[in-house]
């Protein structure tokens, strides 16, 4: 058991920052990202013998984390609760850059599924097949989501360019 725990702790330490950035790109919200990662790592620990035996542990966890973020986003969007102000943590330098960068602002404005495809393709460098595995859909769906996202981004940047 101690060996499994040490293996999991090492895996966590080696993957957390990268997964945080990926899931933050998909979720666009620090709290939602942290919640999704907590859920994914808790699930990974509860299934550690299976996860540790996977050919690509990071891919396995990435799928859990991205799906948790998308599920939390859907759940939050469907609830209509009274608005309670949220105090945000002080942003890190990476967060500052993401907040200021026009490209990330445009990506964050995309629907969640399109945003996930863009982040996984252009930030993580995954293939259409790999993205389809992460999102639990067909490669054709990934292609259509990517095309729609890129068309929206192109329009956004063309519109922004004409305003300047």
Image: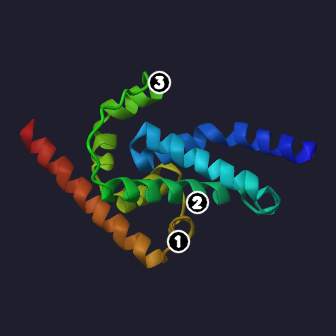
Residue at position x 32%, y 55% in the image: 79
Q: For the residue labelled by badge 1, is the local secondary structure a helix, a strand or a loop?
A: loop
**In the image, is 15 to the left or to the right of 111?**
right
Q: Distance between the residues labelled 1 and 3?
A: 32 Å
Residue at the far front in the pictured view: 82
Which structural element holds mark 2?
helix
Q: Mark 3 points at which residue?
A: 92
Q: Position of residue 114 (x, y in %)?
A: 36, 61
Left or right: residue 145 compared with residue 15: left
Viewer-side residue, 135 vs 143: 135
Q: Residue 30: x percent and y percent? A: 44, 37
Give the left or right position of residue 8, taking residue 96 as reference. Answer: right
Residues at marks 2 and 1 touching, judged by CB atoms closer than 8 Å: yes
| 139 versus 134 height, above or below | below
Q: Where, by quadrant of the figure, is residue 62 drawn?
A: bottom right
Residue 25: where, in percent of width, then height?
43, 45
The residue under the point 79% across, 45% down is: 8
Outermost residue to the left: 163
Identify the disc placed on residue 63.
2
Q: Which of marks 2 and 1 is nearer the N terminus?
A: 2
> In the rendered image, which residue does mark 1 sit on?
136
SS at mark 3 in the image: loop
Q: Residues within 10 Å of mark 1 (few under 14, many from 20)?
A: few
x and y, in percent, of residue 43 in the image: 67, 55
Residue 58 in view, yes or no: no
In front of the other: 87 or 6? 87
């Amino acid at each position: 058991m101690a060996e499994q725990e040490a293996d999991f702790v090492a895996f966590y330490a080696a993957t957390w920052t990268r997964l945080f950035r990926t899931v933050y790109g998909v979720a666009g919200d620090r709290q939602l990202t942290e919640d999704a990662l907590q859920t994914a790592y808790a699930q990974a620990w509860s299934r550690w013998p299976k996860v540790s035996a996977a050919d690509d542990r990071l891919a396995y966890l990435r799928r859990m984390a991205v799906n948790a973020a998308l599920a939390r986003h859907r759940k939050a969007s469907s609830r209509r609760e009274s608005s309670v102000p949220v105090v945000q943590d002080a942003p890190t330098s990476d967060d500052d850059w993401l907040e200021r960068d026009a490209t990330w602002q445009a990506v964050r404005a995309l629907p969640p599924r399109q945003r996930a495809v863009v982040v996984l393709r252009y930030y993580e460098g995954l293939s259409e097949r790999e993205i389809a595995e992460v999102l639990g859909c067909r490669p054709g769906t990934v292609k259509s989501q990517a095309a729609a996202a890129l068309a929206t981004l192109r329009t956004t940047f063309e519109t922004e360019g004409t305003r300047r």
